[in-house]
Structure formats: C-alpha cells, structure tokens
Image: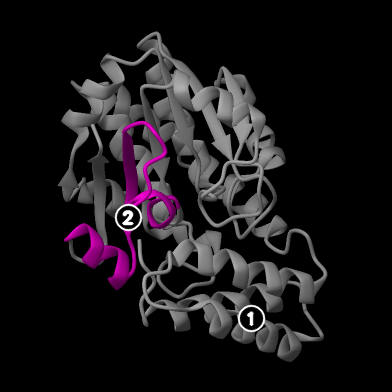
Amino acid sequence: MKACADCAPCLLKRVLFQSRLIGDANEFRTMQSAMRTYADNFREGVCSAEVATKVHAAAYASMECADPYLQLKIDADRIASEFIGEAEKFIDSSEDRFAAAVRVCIIGNIMDFGSGIAIDRPEEFRRMFDGLLAEGIGSDDTGRLRKLVDRSETILYAFDNCGEVLFDKLLIRELKAMRKRVVCVVRGKPILNDVAYDDAVRAGVDGVADRIVSTGAFAVGFPREVCDDGLREEIPRAGVMIAKGMANYEALSDFDIGLPVAFLLRAKCPPVSRSLGVDVGTNVVRVIRD
C-alpha cells in the first residue's frame, strides 16, 4: 500500500507514545530523529510500511531500547487470555467452525497500541470483546480463503499483534484439525507490539504450530527482501499465506511474494479503509492473487 499524507500524524504519534512508554528522557531528540527520517523517505509511490520501518528504526536507535512495548505485550496476552474460553464456546457452538474461528481471530486486531486509531491500553479490550464479536465480518472472502486452505498442504500464518496471537491460535487449531501443516511467521526483531519469536513462545504458539519462522528483519509487516532462511524455504511449500493485521496488508497488498495471500484485519484508519474500499472500523477478510 502506498503512503499518503494521513500516515504522517499517525506514525509520529506512535513514535511519541513508545518514547513515553519507557520514560525516554530524550523524547524531543527521538521525535527529531523520527521526523527527519520521515521527511527524507516520504515520497510519492513509496510503500507505507517501508517508511514506517525506517522511522521506527531511527526512533529505537534514539531511545536505545530494543523492545519498548514489552510490558504492554505481556499485558495484552494476559487480558486476551480472559476471553479465550468465551471465544472457544463461540466456535464450538457454530455450524461452521472454520468461519467462526476466522471471525474470532480478527477481534484481537484492535490491540494496536499508540497510533490513536485503535486502543492505547490492553485493559480497553475488556469492554469491547462482545461488541467486536457481534459485528461479524463486513467484507468477507472467507469462502475464497476456505478453497485455498482446502487445496493446500502447508499454510503460512503471519502474525501481527501480541494479545491477538491468542485468538490466532484458535484458528490455527482449526487448520490443524483439517490436517494442514501450519508454519507461523513472526517479526525478525521486536518492533511495536508485534509478535517476535519470544512473544510467540510466551503465547504457546510452539505448542500448536508445526514450525515458527521469522521475516529475519526489523520491519513493519514484511520486508521486501526476506532475510530468514526458514521463511525462504517455506514460501514455495505453502499454498496460501494468512496475513494478520494492517502492517502486513500495507507491506504485501501490492507486492507479489509468490503465493496467494488472505488478509485478516480490522480496517482502522482512512488510508487502509480506502485501499480496501470499506468504511473505517470494518472487519475484513480479503484474498488476493488466488
């Protein structure tokens, strides 16, 4: 997805948020570094995820902190775990377990902290769960996704946020019940509140997935050049990638990685909503290149 003017305030607000998460005494310097990097890299036609990656790399270097979101990620997992029993009941009572699990796993995509377009604290999720589940999916390619899954032996499952990952596990279990091999993809290094390897293990992903690989890079979503040998091995084996969240959509929606991609996300900002052709706040399953 191409960057647009709306991306600037969102991105810079998140830089300030993460700086204050750790009590960065040099937050002014951090913002200067982020704004300078944004100005140097923002141009017509550039991928929004690529710009965001460079801006966050500059901010992290200024903050001298490898994982400013660590406690928020742990808190998000803890609070999401309070609702797993209810989510399992929803799937168990459904006539279509796969579709129900897809619906459930999108709920956690609201756990997107610091941008001002979702929630800023995991505790806010407690008051939203029932309403999010009741919303359903406003733009729904679940049928197309099911066909891709049916004809695939291996599924790549690219995570987005911590907290959300616990709901992803429920869909992964359904895929395993369909006798699919599931390879989960995490961020190469901690970035934002996204799932890196240690976060996946903490959430118990290693107990449900056949393999965990990474993008091999500090990157918002997917880097254009995959750096991890494991992921390079798995892409040609897979029949489809399930890619969670807006960052993966921004990185991959106009980039062909060599296999069909199903994006599962909540469209939380105007640029992503316009790109998808939906209203802000819509839950989306969108298949491309099937």
Q: Position of residue 185 (x, y in %)?
A: 55, 35
Q: Nearer the viewer, residue 66 or 97?
A: 66
In this rendering, the answer to whether 141 lies above or below 206 is below
Q: Work out whether residue 11 can be spotted.
A: yes
In this rendering, the answer to whether 88 lies above or below 112 is above
- Left-right relation of 225 to 176: right
In percent of the image, x 44 and y 78: which residue is there? 43
The amino acid at mark 1 is: Ala
In percent of the image, x 19 and y 65: which residue is there? 279
Determine which residue is flagged by label 1: 34
Of badges 2 and 1, nearer the viewer stands 1
Q: Position of residue 121 (x, y in %)?
A: 55, 65
Q: Work out whether residue 113 can be spotted.
A: no
- Left-right relation of 255 to 10: left
Q: Could you tell me how far apart the alpha carbons at marks 2 and 1 are, in whole angstroms?
A: 26 Å
Label ID, residue 285: none
Colouring method of the image:
one colour
Quadrant of res 186: top right
> Quick check: is 257 in the magenta stretch?
yes
Q: Position of residue 127 (x, y in %)?
A: 40, 59
> Which element type, helix, strand or loop, lies under badge 1?
helix
In percent of the image, x 28 and y 54: which residue is there? 131
Determine which residue is flagged by label 2: 266
Highlighted range, magenta: 248-277
Q: Nearer the viewer, residue 121 or 45?
A: 45
